[in-house]
Amino acid sequence: MDYLHLASLSCTKWEPVLERELEELINFPKNSGIKFNYTAFSQTEVGQKMLQLWESGLGGALPTTIGILIGIYVSDMLLNTETSLEQWGESYIFSIADLG
C-alpha cells in the first residue's frame, strides 16, 4: 500500500514542515506508563527499513486516529496478539460523541 492510498483513506496526513522523530511517533504517550523499546526495534531488519524510509521523506507523514487504530489491529492480526486500548484513556482516542 502506498502513501497516497493511505492519505486518500484518511489513515495519514502529510505535514512536511512538521517532520517528527520516528521514536516519538511510534512510542506510547508519556503518561501511559508504557515504553516502546525503540532501541531494540531500530536494530531489527524491519526497524532499519523503517528508519531508511523515514529519513528519505516519510517523516512528514502523520497517522490520523483511524490510521493508528488500523495499525494496531493489523499488528495484532499479524502477531496474533490483542492490544488493549484501556490504558490510553479518552484523551488519546476520541469517541463517536466527539464527532457531534
Image (spheres, rainbow, N blue to C red):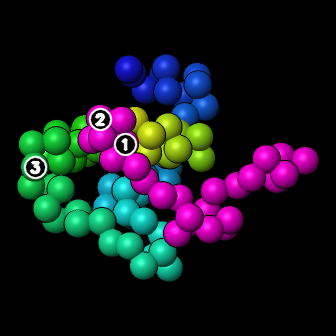
At 74% from the left and 52% from the top, the residue drawn is 95
Instruction: Identify which amino acid the numbered label 1 is placed on.
Output: Asp
Regarding mark 1 in the picture, which secondary structure is present there? helix
- Number of marks in picture: 3
Callout 2 crowding tier (Cα within 10 Å): few <14, some 14–19, many ≥20: few
Residue linked to disc 2: 78
Q: Is residue 40 left or right of residue 5?
A: left
Residue 44's label in the rendered image is 3
Discs 1, 2 touching: Cβ within 8 Å: yes
Q: Position of residue 34 (x, y in %)?
A: 38, 73
What residue span does the magenta drawing correspond to? 76-100
Q: CA distance from mark 3 to mark 2?
A: 17 Å
Residue 61 visible in the current orientation: no
Discs 3, 2 touching: Cβ within 8 Å: no
At 31% from the left and 61% from the top, the residue drawn is 23
Name the quarter where the N terminus is drawn.
top left
Q: Position of residue 9 (x, y in %)?
A: 58, 25
At 48% from the left and 75% from the top, the residue drawn is 32
Instruction: Identify which amino acid the numbered label 2 is placed on.
Output: Leu
Residue 76's label in the rendered image is 1
Q: Earlier in the sequence, mark 3 or mark 2?
A: 3
